[in-house]
């Protein structure tokens, strides 16, 4: 826990402010009192505290209303709020949690209880901040490292290809082929990392209205050569209703490319892939259905996590970075869509993307 946590106490009874303030100051906390809801809002917005102890029954603006305003303000939305009240009815406690409270303390106060709950929620809050800072640092590091690695790997691949022209057979040729294969794996990983960064970039999307079915036909055609190499047939079954979607055309292409290439990768030779669309009022669902390996039920909740790969021998035998579906999910959500999967091990999978349409 960081030094001298800052706690805002909100109560319209001066005696309660004195009791709680004295109690928490003795425990090493920095305490700020607020005599009503409006004072509390002003104080919290001026200097957001680490935690707020908030009375419910106050004149003018009650604790529930204060909490709602704090949660609606991005500057104070993450500050944990512990409600304090003489009310001990279940409905009062339920409402406290519904408006965003993290805990509830009933008057009269007990020093040990107040101290324990305050310390517990401060510890949780500081851990949340540390995790957030680490995630921010990690994402920035991925962007920097992947960007700086891409050019050297590209140069290395170029020189390897030049050497392969001079050494078309023999031991040196075999070494160069292995070097090229390893470099290609690194290239794919770095490219996927950059794709993750671009997908998460707040200003990188160019959303426009696009006719869906012609675009899907084009994207399917781009994958047909890879499918033919495994004797896999891709069928397109569009809905009778032609629709338009608001998407970044290139990003949507990434989504379909990932889903189709995955379907090809995990479908045995001679299988089939079906791309279909289903229009329902103001949304359209694009499905990619394969007759591939399928996915174990315990893996489905983790499929869209970064770097996750299904931990089975048959799945791990296929090369991958574990970033493709994370990219797909991020892009889809940036275009106001949703993504999901239905699968049965040994029988195949259906990945779907739903988008607003007109």
Image (cartoon, helix red, strand yellow):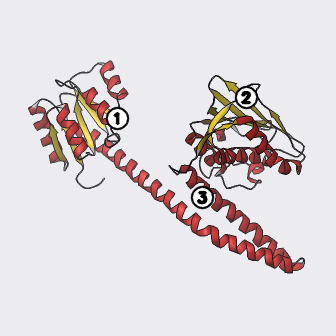
Calculate the distance from the C-alpha at mark 3 to the C-alpha at mark 2. 34 Å
Lower position in the chain sequence, tag 1 or tag 2: 1
Quarter of the rendering occupied by the C terminus: top right
Residue 351 visible in image: no
Select label 1 or label 2 by which is in front: 2
Mark 2 highlights which residue?
242
* In this view, 14 is above or below 92: below
Residue that appears at 20% across and 39% down: 42
| Drawn side of residue 138 relative to residue 53, left or right | right
| Drawn side of residue 264 relative to residue 52, left or right | right
Q: Which mark is residue 194?
A: 3
Label 2 near label 3: C-beta < 8 Å? Answer: no
**Tag 1, which secondary structure?**
helix
**Tag 2, which secondary structure?**
loop
Q: Residues within 10 Å of mark 2 (few under 14, many from 20)?
A: some
Select label 3 or label 2 by which is in front: 2
Mark 1 highlights which residue?
72
> In front: 83, or 75?
75
**Res 59 → quadrant:** top left
- Residue 216 in the image, given as x and y percentages of width and height: 75, 39
Lower position in the chain sequence, tag 3 or tag 2: 3
- Residue 12 in the image, given as x and y percentages of width and height: 14, 29
Calculate the distance from the C-alpha at mark 1 to the C-alpha at mark 2. 40 Å
Residue 201 visible in image: yes
Calculate the distance from the C-alpha at mark 1 to the C-alpha at mark 3. 33 Å
Residue that appears at 68% across and 64% down: 187
| Drawn side of residue 159 relative to residue 269, left or right | left
Q: Residues within 10 Å of mark 1 (few under 14, many from 20)?
A: few
**Tag 3, which secondary structure?**
helix
Lower position in the chain sequence, tag 1 or tag 3: 1
Residue that appears at 17% across and 36% down: 39
């Amino acid at each position: 826990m960081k030094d001298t946590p800052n706690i805002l106490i909100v109560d319209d009874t001066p005696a309660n402010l004195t009791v709680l303030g004295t109690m928490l100051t003795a425990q090493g906390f920095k305490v700020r009192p607020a005599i009503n809801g409006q004072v509390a809002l002003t104080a919290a917005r001026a200097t957001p505290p680490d935690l707020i102890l908030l009375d419910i029954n106050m004149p003018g603006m009650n604790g529930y209303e204060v909490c709602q305003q704090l949660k609606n303000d991005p500057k104070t939305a993450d500050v944990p709020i512990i409600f304090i009240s003489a009310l001990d009815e279940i409905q009062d406690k339920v409402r406290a949690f519904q408006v965003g409270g993290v805990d509830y303390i009933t008057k009269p106060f007990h020093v040990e209880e107040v101290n324990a709950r305050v310390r517990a929620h401060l510890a949780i809050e500081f851990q949340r901040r540390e995790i957030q800072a680490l995630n921010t640092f990690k994402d920035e590091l991925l962007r920097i490292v992947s960007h700086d690695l891409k050019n050297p790997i590209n140069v290395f691949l170029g020189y390897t290809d030049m050497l392969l022209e001079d050494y078309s057979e023999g031991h040196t040729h075999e070494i160069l082929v292995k070097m090229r294969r390893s470099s290609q794996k690194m290239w794919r990983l770095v490219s996927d990392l950059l794709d993750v960064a671009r997908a998460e970039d707040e200003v990188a999307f160019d959303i426009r209205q696009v006719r869906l079915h012609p675009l899907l036909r084009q994207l399917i055609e781009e994958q047909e050569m890879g499918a033919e190499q495994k004797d896999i047939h891709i069928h397109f079954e569009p809905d009778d209703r032609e629709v338009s979607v608001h998407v970044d055309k290139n990003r949507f292409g990434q989504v379909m490319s990932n889903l189709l290439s995955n379907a090809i990768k995990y479908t045995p030779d001679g299988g089939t892939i079906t791309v279909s669309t289903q229009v329902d009022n103001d949304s359209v669902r694009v499905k990619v259905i394969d007759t591939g390996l399928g996915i174990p039920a315990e893996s489905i909740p983790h499929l869209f996590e970064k770097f996750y790969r299904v931990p089975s021998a048959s799945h791990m035998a296929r090369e991958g970075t574990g970033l493709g579906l994370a990219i797909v999910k991020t892009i889809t959500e940036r275009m106001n869509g949703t993504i999901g999967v239905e699968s049965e091990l040994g029988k195949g999978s259906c990945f779907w993307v739903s988008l607003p349409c007109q």
